Image (cartoon, rainbow, N blue to C red):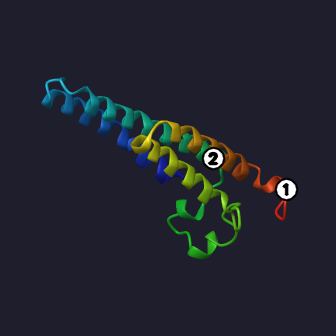
Amino acid sequence: MKVEYKVFLAMTPFYIVVGVIYGIATDWSEPVGIVGLLLTAGLVTMIGLYLVLTAKKMDDRPEDDPEGLIEEGAGDQGVYAPWSWWPLATGFSAAVVFAALAVGWWLLYIGVAIGIVALVGWVFEYSRGQHAH
């Protein structure tokens, strides 16, 4: 995790400097780009700080060792939902929500309702059925 947080935290001053340069180049008359760049700086800072806190709680990984071998990273890498259809339903709900921008706002309510059902189903997938814990 050491490399990851260094990359994200190194991008923070870059986006701040670019945001200020953009503001000077546009005579501070175009606020959307300035705000967007400064918010991007805040975003990469939050991600970098999350990775710093996570790295403190974890042991070193094979990726962190310059002499590490590929074989050291073998084994389980996490818990993934096998044969899950909920990501498809979540993506469909996002498509319906974005279609609401073109079709009409009434479609937004349908997309949000589908999204809530899909999200609850995805979160509680391991609570019932074949893969229940």
At mark 2, the secondary structure is: helix
> Where's residue 2, x and y in %?
51, 51
What amino acid is labelled 2 in the image?
Ile
Q: Position of residue 103 (x, y in %)?
A: 43, 44
Nearer the viewer's eye, disc 2 or disc 1?
Answer: 2
Tell me where residue 86 sits by quadrant. Answer: bottom right
Residue where numbered disc 2 is placed: 114
> Which class describes the residues within 10 Å of circle 2: few (<14), some (14-19), or many (20+)?
some
Q: Going 19% across and 23% down the picture, which residue do you hit?
A: 28
Answer above or below: position of 114 versus 78: above
Question: Residue at 60% across / 59% down in the picture?
Answer: 88
Q: Residue drawn 84% across and 56% down?
A: 128
What label sits on residue 20 in the rendered view? none
- Locate residue 44 relative to residue 73 in the image: left or right: left
Determine which residue is flagged by label 1: 128
Give the CA distance from mark 2 to mark 1. 20 Å
Q: Dividing the image into 4 quarters, which one contains the C terminus?
A: bottom right
The mark that comes first in sequence, 2 or 1, is 2
Front in this rendered view, residue 105 or 63:
105
Secondary element type, mark 1 = loop
Query: Does 23 sit above or below residue 111?
Result: above
Asked whether residue 49 appears in the rendered view, the answer is: no
Residue 102 percent location from the top left of the image:
39, 44
- Towards the viewer: 122 or 35: 122
